[in-house]
Image (cartoon, helix red, strand yellow):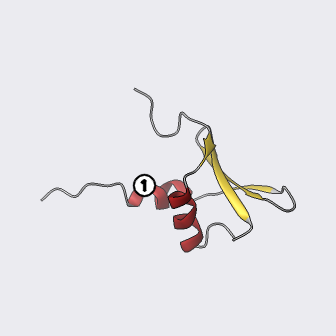
Amino acid sequence: MANEYSSNGALSANELNVLRFNNLIESNEIAFRFGDLYVAENVVTKERRVLQSAALVLTEGRRVLKG
């Protein structure tokens, strides 16, 4: 079974909104997965940077609480 990091590609609109809400990416940036990294790319300048805490922010909402 593949894990969430095995695929490369663009993130969903919802995931991008979460990253923007948490100030991890700017309004002129997109983000995508590249192996086990999350990368932000400025759509104007094409400059890229690695998002250090994106995985943590994106997986927080997926946890199931047992009680």
Quarter of the view holding residue 24: bottom right
Q: Is residue 61 above or below residue 5?
A: below
Figure quadrant of residue 36: top right
Q: Which residue is mark 1?
A: 59
Q: Secondary structure at mark 1?
A: helix
Q: Is residue 53 above or below residue 6?
A: below
Q: Position of residue 52 (x, y in %)?
A: 61, 58
Q: Amino acid at mark 1?
A: Thr
Relative depth, front residue between 34 and 17: 17
**Residue 37 image position (x, y, % from top left):** 62, 45
Drawn side of residue 35 relative to residue 1, left or right: right
Residue at coordinates 38% horizontally, 60% vertically from top-left?
A: 61
* Furthest residue in direction top, as rendered: 1
**Res. 22 visible in picture:** no
Counting the numbered discs, the total is: 1
Q: What's the residue at 36%, 54% (across, down)?
A: 62
Quadrant where the image shows the N terminus: top left
Q: Quadrant of the C terminus?
A: bottom left
Residue farthest to the left, as pictured: 67
Camera-side residue of 39 and 52:
39
- What crowding class fits label 1: few (fewer than 14 Cα within 10 Å), some (14-19), or many (20 or more)? few
